[in-house]
Image: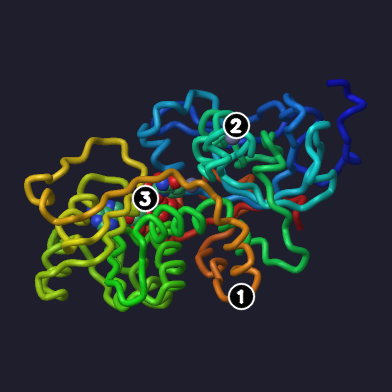
Amino acid sequence: MTTTEIELAPASDATLSTGTDMKALVYHGPGERAWENKPRPAIQHPSDAIVRITTSTICGTDLHILKGDLTAVTDGRILGHEGIGVVEQVGPGVSEFHVGDKVIISCVSACLKCDFCKRGMYSHCRHGGWILGYTIDGTQTEFVRIPHADGSLYHFPADADEEAMVMLSDILPTGFECGVLNGQVKPGDSVAIVGAGPVGLAVLLTAQFYSPAAIFMIDLDDKRLAVAKEFGATTLINSSDARAAQRVLDLTEGAGVDVAIEAVGVPATFDICQAIVAAGGRIANVGVHGKPVELHLEKLWDRNIAITTRLVDTVTTPMLLKVVRSGKLQPGKLVTHRFAMNDIMKAYDTFGNAAKEGALKVVLTNSASA
Ligand SMILES: NC(=O)c1ccc[n+]([C@@H]2O[C@H](COP(=O)([O-])OP(=O)(O)OC[C@H]3O[C@@H](n4cnc5c(N)ncnc54)[C@H](O)[C@@H]3O)[C@@H](O)[C@H]2O)c1
Ligand SMILES: [Zn+2]
Ligand SMILES: [Zn+2]
């Protein structure tokens, strides 16, 4: 590739960086993160775009990374897989996006050409998948390289709300695909969602496309449960007394729920799902797990149940974008805290102490977006 093949944007004087450096949230092994200088990314492949980040967020998965649950993340990696930004540069192979376009960044990069992409399983794209802020540098910074830009970016609707749209990067498609679609939520179903974090709440919002009869929301945090009530949960269960499964069984006359959705990522919450799934029901796992879970086949072998797992494919993002744009889904209401990107260390402290801080989605903005 020659430099003349790359469309260059006029230099922006409003970004935080100087010269060829930028500030970024960098992972340095379990429990270790720093806000430090990194070189600005450059186009590496013809299908790449460089995006100047205007808005980003922190995900529960970033907390799993910092716990050391995801060992593929190496020292020095810039975290973050959610964001909105403006295209700064495109490689010669990018046809759908141009310099200056405002875009929604998908957490999953898709080449659109490989066998997995052709099956709609972008999460396992042979040349992408979930790599952003995982095996390549991510969005909690000023500039990010997006591989396979044509398959990994979405045009930002002109009149849209940036805080609502950033929920399309990850949590809305995750909740909908891994929880609601895999759980096959149907009208009249009873559904239990274990975990009322942003992802569990995204499950709650999108499950209601299908009019389930009852939605049980289970969490340790009463503040998050109160938000779930506002968002349509019919029953709230605080599981800190370790009696959540029994409560669900009592409330369903011993039958359990048609769909049990795990949106935390620890053994205790998968255990709740195993204990409450009704005969003929589905357990849909959404949480990222770092530890083995005991599978109770001695209790489940004759229950005609299905257990699914999924890494979000983001194939439903275009549909969800239309619903958010229509105002029928208002994921912007998940935002509880706003920080300048420069204050991301504080934002992590807040999101990492979500119960104490009353935090759900923490939005980060670069000053250039003002
Ligand atoms: N499968 C995918 O593609 C995918 C994509 C994105 C996120 N995720 C995962 O989804 C999960 C949820 O993400 P999030 O951003 O909402 O995370 P989060 O950390 O904000 O929320 C987790 C919630 O679980 C609750 N919780 C913790 N232990 C509990 C217990 N024992 N019983 C009941 N509730 C408990 C917490 O109080 C919190 O509200 C994470 O594991 C994340 O990594 C998966
Ligand atoms: Zn995520
Ligand atoms: Zn692919």
**204 over 116 or under it: above or below:** below
Q: How far apart are marks 3 and 1 (CA)?
A: 25 Å
Of the residues under marks 3 and 1, which one precedes in the sequence? Answer: 3
Q: Is residue 278 left or right of residue 366?
A: left
Q: Report x, y in % for residue 273.
A: 22, 56
Residue 327 image label: 1
Residue ranking furthest to the left: 298
Q: Report x, y in % for residue 145.
A: 69, 34
Q: In this view, does 48 lie to the left or right of 229?
A: right
Res 91 quadrant in image: top right
Question: Is the C-beta of the residue carrying label 3 under 8 Å from the nearest atom of ligand 1?
Answer: yes
Q: Which of 234 and 254 is in front in this view?
A: 254
Q: Nearer the viewer, residue 92 or 184?
A: 184
Residue picked out by circle 3: 286
Question: Is the C-beta of the residue carrying label 2 under 8 Å from the nearest atom of ligand 2?
Answer: no
* Amino acid carrying mark 2 in the image: Asp
* Amino acid carrying mark 3 in the image: Val
Residue 138 image label: none
Secondary structure beneath label 1? loop
Q: How is the image coloured?
A: rainbow
**76 over 182 or under it: above or below:** above
Q: Which residue is drawn at 42% across and 36% down?
A: 65
Q: Can I make out residue 35 in this image?
A: no
Of the residues under marks 1 and 2, which one precedes in the sequence? Answer: 2
**Badge 2: how crowded within 10 Å, few (<14), some, or many (20+)?**
many
Q: In this view, does 314 lie to the left or right of 269?
A: right
Which one is closest to the eye, mark 1 or mark 2?
Answer: 1
Q: Distance between the residues labelled 2 and 3?
A: 23 Å
